[in-house]
Image: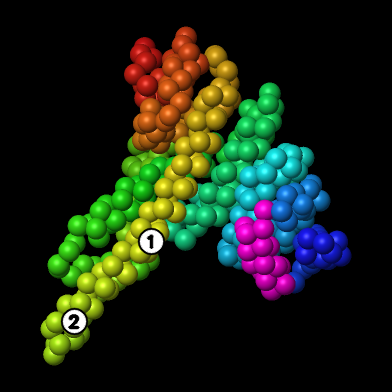
Amino acid sequence: MKRDSTVYTAILFILQSSTNVDLLHNLSSLLDLVLDVDEELLVAWAMPDFVQGLHEAIKQTGEEKELTVDSYLHCLQLLSTTENGVQALVECTGVLFPRLTAHVARVCGEDVIAVGGRERSLASAMSVLNVLFSSAGEEALVLLEKNSYCVECVMQLFEVIQEDRRTSMTLAAAGASQKSTPVSTPHSTRHRTEEKSESDVNGTGRRTCAEGSPRTDTSQSRETEAGGSEDHGKSQDTVPVVRNLMEVHMLYSVTVEFLADIVKALPKGESQVAGYLNGCTRDQIESMVLALQDHTDDTLIPHLEEVLSGSEDKYPRLAAAIGMDAS
């Protein structure tokens, strides 16, 4: 594939012009695999026309084909790990930023914001959005202004991710501490949300819960063997819980970095983006502030205080979240 240019030409043609959903799905799986394991090929194909091809494939596939979109989004994220790939992505900012924002917005627009099973696709989208945002320089805030629902969606999603993270950590801790008693282990995690009371006009707060399938041991005759089998089963059952925790933590970390970069880009005084943040619910804002306080960059909160200084009355929720008097 690296030596035969006709392979790249054929793949590019399929990405840019094929309407065969099955073909696009199979190609997405192939590209996801080879680009992940072959860095030389990843660097060689890190070009704007390849990025445009991936964008066209996502557009043609449609959001309902989540596995296919997941693979193509991961390909974009892999490209962002190379210098040439970042340059290629930046050249396609005009089409990529709205497309990736729409992907996140689609999840947030559901009655139930379900993160489970979408951690990788959302992390890929969020990571590339942040690369495009961070590489835009003075135009970074303009990107968010042109895609005004981006900030709101990221904040909504972050609140759900935080709840998912807490749930996953609790389940992982419970699985690790259970030594001798049968446990109910979730084989799949479904994330639900509940709307806040209508008294909050911006009420989009959500919480999550996990559902699991209980383990049962029907063996009655071989107590010793059953005991050993049960211990092995418990060890196996903790695997999906730990894997889920890792995936959620990855998504959490990527989202925190995006929010941190947004805050760092805020200018002192009034701005539309500060208004977008202030328009989120108090719980969402407080969740963001707590994450920023735990961030390794200890300049984030002082910068936010400087941004809001003298404008507390315009951004009362942001000001209250960091302990500034908006009166």
**Disc 1 + disc 2, Cβ < 8 Å:** no
In the rendering, at what x and y percent does residue 319 appear? 40, 20
Of marks 1 and 2, the one in the foreground = 2
**Image height of 130 relative to 192, above or below:** above
**Disc on the earlier residue, 1 or 2:** 1
Question: 75 or 286, which is in the foreground?
Answer: 75
Q: Amino acid at mark 1?
A: Arg
Give the residue displayed 47% in from the left and 37% down from the top: 256
Give the residue displayed 41% in from the left and 53% down from the top: 246
Give the residue displayed 35% in from the left and 13% down from the top: 325
- Residue 3 visible, this angle: yes
In the rendering, at what x and y percent does residue 272 appear? 58, 25
Q: Which range is magenta? A: 22-39
Give the residue displayed 77% in from the left and 52% down from the top: 44
Residue at which label 1 appears: 190
Say left or right for 5 vs 43. Answer: right
**Image height of 107 relative to 305, above or below:** below
- Residue 212 visible, this angle: no
Mark 2, secondary structure of its residue:
helix
Residue at which label 2 appears: 226
Q: Amino acid at mark 2?
A: Ala
Circle 2 crowding by C-alpha within 10 Å: few under 14, some 14–19, many from 20: some
**The N terminus: image quadrant:** bottom right
In the rendering, at what x and y percent does residue 55 appear? 72, 53
**The C terminus: image quadrant:** top left
Rendering quarter of residue 151: top right
Question: 200 or 193, which is in the foreground?
Answer: 193
Residue 35 drawn in magenta: yes
Q: Main secondary structure of the magenta part?
A: helix
Circle 1 crowding by C-alpha within 10 Å: few under 14, some 14–19, many from 20: some
Say left or right for 290 vs 110. Answer: left
